[in-house]
Image (cartoon, rainbow, N blue to C red):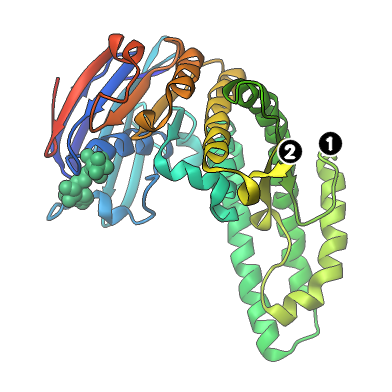
Amino acid sequence: MHIEQLQLTNYRNYEKLDISFDDKVNVIIGENAQGKTNLMEAIYLLAFTKSHRTPREKELIGWDKEYAKIEGRITKRNHSIPLEIIISSKGKKAKLNRLEQKRLSDYIGAMNVVMFAPEDLTLVKGPPQTRRRFIDMELGQIQPRYIYHLGQYQKILKQRNHLLKQMQRNRTTDFTMLEVLSEQMIEHASTLLERRFVFMDLLRKWAKPIHHGISRELENLEIRYSATIEVSEDADMEKIGTIYRDKFKEVQEKEVERGTTLIGPHRDDLIFYVNGKDVQTYGSQGQQRTTALSIKLAEIELIYGEIGEYPILLLDDVLSELDDFRQSHLLNTIQGRVQTFVSTTSVDGIHHDTLKQAELFRVIDGSVDN
Ligand SMILES: Nc1ncnc2c1ncn2[C@@H]1O[C@H](COP(=O)(O)OP(=O)(O)OP(=O)(O)O)[C@@H](O)[C@H]1O
């Protein structure tokens, strides 16, 4: 799949932009603070309806403007699909094929994007929510139904936490209402966990050989899913539900004492091991970087395996940070099959093979020349 055209209106420092892209490699070049990341962010937002940088949507609207509009046209399975997002103080609208989609799960998944940005190093180093967000975003784009379950789960979790706080204050020992909410939560928690286990299987399948290759066959990557319940990854939803039910019973008094939900997918994590050692604790910068890159490259293959189309790859300010060997690896993976966007302040650190096949776009203060 590739994005043919992008139009921005009042988006960050782009008042008006209408631009067409190459279906192979696009290099976005410019000095600092000119709008390179803003452009990448707009492409990302068109796929996920969310920015990768901020949860505050107001920041995306150009200063002194009422609204921001992002329009794009992608080609997928030889079909041309128009996409549109409008953000204003009233909220956000997402249109697919010119029709407004009320539920995000009906919109997300139409356009598939994999982004690799400097902050992706935090995938390994950062707090658990970074890794949970990664799983949720990736699963969401290959299985839109996952987003529905996640939304429902989060809604019930909020209610449950609210109730637990009340019970904590009132020192209640009547668990009837809590059990009703636990039951509702278990339904979605088991679906989320079962889907995450299938995803883990695919992620390992692709990430392991990629990591082995990037590390010049010196390193062996293992990824462990760490859940709040003891469960085998091949358990079905019913089994997972039963384990959650028992565990909720076991911890309910403790939950009231603490005033919060102690188990569930919102507390799970991923642990990466290289040659048997936890990379987050013991890995060098290089090993953490290789792990993050392997995961990103694995995602490209995983999406292709699931939907039969390669996603669009956004490399924001990271290519020149990879050494020649890692860059070559990345290029071998892409091999002209994946539409790629590279943003950089200088072409110096970029492999000449990448530049040979690339179209160059020069960004200066919110306008683009090519
Ligand atoms: N809502 C907004 N309205 C107008 N301008 C904005 C808005 N948000 C950010 N900007 C401007 O966008 C510019 C930053 O653009 P961007 O983050 O894309 O930089 P960049 O070209 O990627 O630079 P770097 O190489 O430093 O990462 C800044 O000049 C900033 O003031």
User: What residue lies at 27% left-to-right and 31% top-to-bottom?
Assistant: 344
Image coordinates of residue 162 in percent, x first then y, are 61, 74
Judge left or right: residue 289 versus residue 100: right
- Whether 252 is drawn above or below 194: the answer is below
Callout 1 amino acid: Asp
User: What residue lies at 39% left-to-right and 54% top-to-bottom?
Assistant: 55
User: What residue lies at 24% left-to-right and 15% top-to-bottom?
Assistant: 359
Q: Can residue 91 be spotted in the picture?
A: yes
User: Do callouts 2 and 1 mark residues in contact (Cβ within 8 Å)?
Assistant: yes
Image coordinates of residue 336 in percent, x first then y, are 42, 10
Name the quadrant containing residue 253.
bottom right
Q: Which residue is mark 2?
A: 197
The N terminus is located in which quarter?
Answer: top left
- Whether 361 is drawn above or below 283: the answer is above
Foreground: 31 or 265? Answer: 31
Mark 2 burial class by Cα count in 10 Å: few <14, some 14-19, many 20+: some
Looking at marks 2 and 1 on the same chain, the residue that comes earlier in the sequence is marked by 2
Q: Secondary structure at mark 2?
A: helix
User: What residue lies at 67% left-to-right and 26% top-to-bottom?
Assistant: 208
Q: Which residue is mark 1?
A: 234
Disc 2 and disc 1: Cα gap in Å? 8 Å
Foreground: 90 or 292? Answer: 292
Callout 2 amino acid: Phe
Picture disc at residue 52: none
The C terminus is located in which quarter?
Answer: top left
Mark 1 burial class by Cα count in 10 Å: few <14, some 14-19, many 20+: few
Foreground: 290 or 338? Answer: 290
Q: Secondary structure at mark 1?
A: loop
Q: Can residue 103 be spotted in the picture?
A: no
Name the quadrant containing residue 348.
top left
Image coordinates of residue 92 in percent, x first then y, are 33, 48
Judge left or right: residue 274 versus residue 123: right
